[in-house]
Image: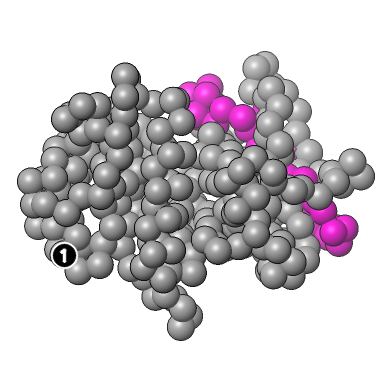
Amino acid sequence: MAITFRKLTERSEIEQVEKLEGLIWDPNSVIPYHMTLTMAKFGGLFLGAYDEEKMIGFLYSFPGYTNGESHLCSHMLGFLPDYRKQGLGVQMKWMQLDAAKEQGFPKITWTYDPLETVNGFLNIAKLGGVVRTYYPDCYGELDDDFNRGLPTDRFLVEWFVDSDRVARHRVGQAMHPSTEHAPEILSYEIAGTIPQPTDISLSHEEPVLLLPVPAHFQEVKRADMEIARRWRESTRRLFENYFAQGYVVTNILRDQSVVRYVLEKQPLDDILS
């Protein structure tokens, strides 16, 4: 199987994106073709992944402008089920980064649920993105299997395309702070087979902190929605508190039942260089 990637510029290609979005997610909630076509015509970046001539994945983004700074907003990335977990998303993100450089964008931004740690590992540990912004209930109530029943809190990932940090991640030479003596700012216990939060600490000042979250949050939701709500509430308080103090998420450490976000308190320029 030889998968190829290319920019999408033709109307027929953009139309395929709409059809593929419906196959990957809910066909009743796809972004209308006339909107994606307008994005493509006026600065949007659309990328497609193909198995021969069959589109099997896509990524699209559009220009944004925040606090006087332009950036590329990465909105949606998806693959058909048979093509997931093969590293194709990572390849497409690096292609997006190269295109953003060509267009002069200093960074690419996107959001994800901080409790969905598979996405977090890709965004932070593999790609070298950083997080210093938390959006509580970003999209309001969503009635799909992935989001139903909880506030749609999101991290804002910032991917600084020309930074040394991102360049090192691209070649597998990422540098991370020592976590040997870093305190955990959330305590938890295993209830049956799932972790549940027991206490949080909002007063640490060490340069590196660890924040454990469930490794498999959808399993927590299926087992006990009340425990899932407690994870949402506890982690929201912690991230908002420590981001306000200048901490930045720079890495993720994986374990069996939990993963640990690494938060560093140092200037962003030092983190990126």
> Is 252 rendered above or below residue 63?
above
Sort mark 1 into few (<14), some (14-19) or many (20+) by Cα contacts within 10 Å: few
**Front residue of this view, candidates 252 and 96:** 96
Q: Residue 157 at what x, y percent from top left?
A: 52, 56
Q: Provide the residue span drawn in magenta.
A: 195-223
> Is 106 rendered above or below residue 92?
below
Residue found 46% across the figure and 78% down from its top = 69
Instruction: State the image quarter where residue 228 is shown.
Output: top right
Residue 200 in view: no
Residue found 43% across the figure and 46% down from its top = 93
Q: Residue 248 at what x, y percent from top left?
A: 68, 60
**Front residue of this view, candidates 187 and 216:** 216
Residue 52 located left or right of residue 83? left
**Membership of 229 in magenta stretch:** no
Q: For the residue marked with disc 1, what is the amino acid?
A: Lys
Residue found 69% across the figure and 44% down from its top = 173
Instruction: State the image quarter where residue 212 is shown.
Output: top right
Which residue position is annotated with label 1? 41
- Which quarter of the figure is the N terminus placed in? top left
**Front residue of this view, candidates 71 and 189:** 71
